[in-house]
Image (tube, rainbow, N blue to C red):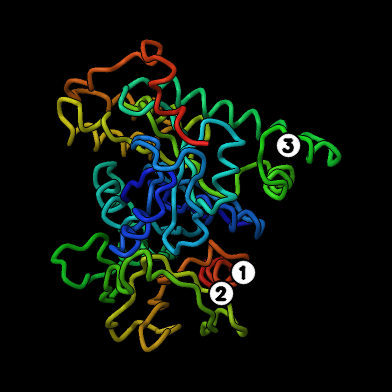
Amino acid sequence: MAKVRIGHFVEAQILEALNVDYIDESEVLTPADPSLHINKKSFEIPFVCGAKNLGEALRRIGEGAAMIRTKGEPGTGDVIEAVKHMRLMNSELSRIKNLTKEELMNTAKELQAPIHLIEYIHKNGKLPVVNFAAGGIATPADAAMMMQLGCDGVFVGSGIFKSGDPRKRADAIVKAVSNYNDPKILAEISENLGEAMVGINVHSIEKSDKMSNRGY
Amino acid sequence: MKKIGVLSLQGGFKEHLDMIRKLGHEGIEVRKSEDFNNLHGIILPGGESTAIGKLIVDLKIKEELINQVKNGLPVWGTCAGMILLAKEIDNRSNTHLNLMDICVKRNAYGSQLDSFVTEAKIKYISTKNIPLVFIRAPYITSTGENVKILCKIDDDIVAAREDNILVTSFHPELTDDLSCHEYFINKML
């Protein structure tokens, strides 16, 4: 997996030429376009994109994203934003499922999302692509919590690499995702992991400095 | 109604469980030894063979899985599942479950960009063409004498059976076609 800046389609072309497995069009990097994301339909390589609510997820899928992840707040080790984004997405999904057909176009308008994807959710009650948790996951329990909230998988970066023993923590987080519903195993694998990353409280970050506000 | 386990540590287990339930059977997520109780068969899904291979050791279910299959439990490995079952892996000295007399090549078609969908008939499984989804797939480079080859694509072996073990390089669980699951459940269990 390799990251490109939001909207930077030439970086994506280069990564595709390098034959990477997939591309993350990521808010962690400074956006390259003031209003547009990459038209991911013009690429063969699959893309993952961040979203903090359903409308954003559906706009990215409409542009061709093959996978979605919560934005969370990357680099903080504070899981609260990822939880917020996942809960919001879940409640919007169940709300749309329970709407009448007549209400769908207005919902598409409200969420600024493609109508055909709103219709898909109304029928199936879920996103048409997988949804990962990302942005602030730092412990095995965080990872398991995101899985119990309905994510299909978990991305962890600094939560592992800025911890005291990255190897051990990576190993434990992988096992936590496999056994996310088994508190006994979660307790065992959470032992002796060394220092967790030094966290940053999301509430101490100015709104304008939040990476999750990047993207359109 | 049969009880069919799907190894659910990593990879595409949910999709297999959906197919099993669509065919009216009970799908069980297998993560620990107790989950093997009274299974009629088990599916090893696609995913990352290295990650799954490590997890079955760390979570202490590797021996149970080997014993169950040696004692006749029908097993079907798709993609990474095929690699787990093989007795030989091209360019690697280590194997995982070491149960089926085949040599497999990992990422045999190349990287993600070389993933593809095609169609073919599969001996004993389908009389018409069915969709075959290959995602960074392995294929079989050689087989032992008791292994029946079920399908080849461009001369490469992508489906085979040896007694109670079935393997496919491709992912039937990612299509709407139920033939492979029907074969495994109705003919092997």
> Is any atom of residue B84 visible in this view?
yes
Which residue matches tag 3?
A109
Host chain of mark 1: B
Q: Quadrant of residue B20?
A: bottom right
Nearer to me, B11 or A84:
A84
Host chain of mark 3: A
Outermost left residue: B93
- Inspect the image, locate mark 1, and give the three-letter code of the amino acid beneath it: Asp
What SS does tag 2 mark?
A: strand
| Residue A86 drawn at (x, y percent) | 52, 29
Outermost front residue: A34
Q: Label 1 to label 3, Cα distance in Å?
A: 36 Å
Which residue matches tag 2?
B131
| Residue B123 drawn at (x, y percent) | 51, 85
| Residue A82 drawn at (x, y percent) | 45, 27
A99 relative position to B95: left or right: right
Judge if badges 2 and 3 mark residues of a common chain: no
Q: What residue do we see at 62% from left, 55% from top?
A: B25
| Residue A140 drawn at (x, y percent) | 32, 28
